[in-house]
Amino acid sequence: MLTFEDCLKCCRLTEAEIDAIAEHENLPEMVALELANCLVQTADGRRRIRRMILDDIETAERQGSAGHALVLRATLRHFIDTHPENPAQPGRRAAG
């Protein structure tokens, strides 16, 4: 039987990125991991993940959760750094 950690190793995302998707979509962590693994495979899916994290940041700021917003900003930065919009062009970074 595969554990969450086993599945996470197969996914090209971090646990923080999965947590942000779970938060945005109000999903259990394992379901969010499955969704994320599908989304990260396409440019449109990666844009959707980026938007989810941005939405989470906006919600955290609106709720006065500055610490959580800071964590989400670091999560977004890592996601952008590791999943550029167009991987065919090395060094190009997507706008967040």
Image (cartoon, rainbow, N blue to C red):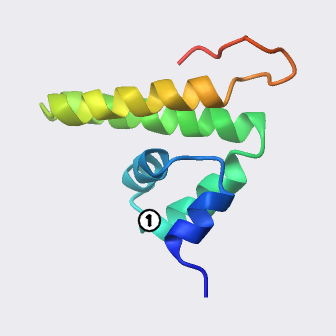
Amino acid identity at mark 1: Glu
Furthest residue in direction left, as rendered? 64
Q: Is residue 63 above or below residue 28?
A: above
User: Residue, x 55% and y 32% (percent of image)?
Assistant: 79
User: Residue, x 60% and y 80% (percent of image)?
Assistant: 2
Q: Which residue is mark 1?
A: 29
Q: Which image quarter: residue 7?
A: bottom right
Q: Is residue 68 left or right of residue 21?
A: left
Q: Nearer the viewer, residue 26 or 28?
A: 28
Q: Nearer the viewer, residue 27 or 18?
A: 18
Which percent across, then down, holds residue 26?
A: 39, 59
Which percent across, then down, holds residue 95?
A: 58, 14
The quarter of the rendered structure image containing the N terminus is bottom right
Furthest residue in direction bottom, as rendered? 1
Q: Is residue 19 left or right of residue 90?
A: left
SS at mark 1? helix
Q: Which image quarter: residue 28?
A: bottom left
User: Residue, x 79% and y 22% (percent of image)?
Assistant: 86
Q: Is residue 47 above or below residue 85?
A: below
User: Residue, x 69% and y 45% (percent of image)?
Assistant: 40
Q: Is residue 93 left or right of residue 86?
A: left
User: How packed is label 1: few (under 14 Cα within 10 Å), some, or many (20 or more)?
Assistant: some
Which percent across, then down, holds residue 70?
A: 27, 27
Q: How many marks?
A: 1
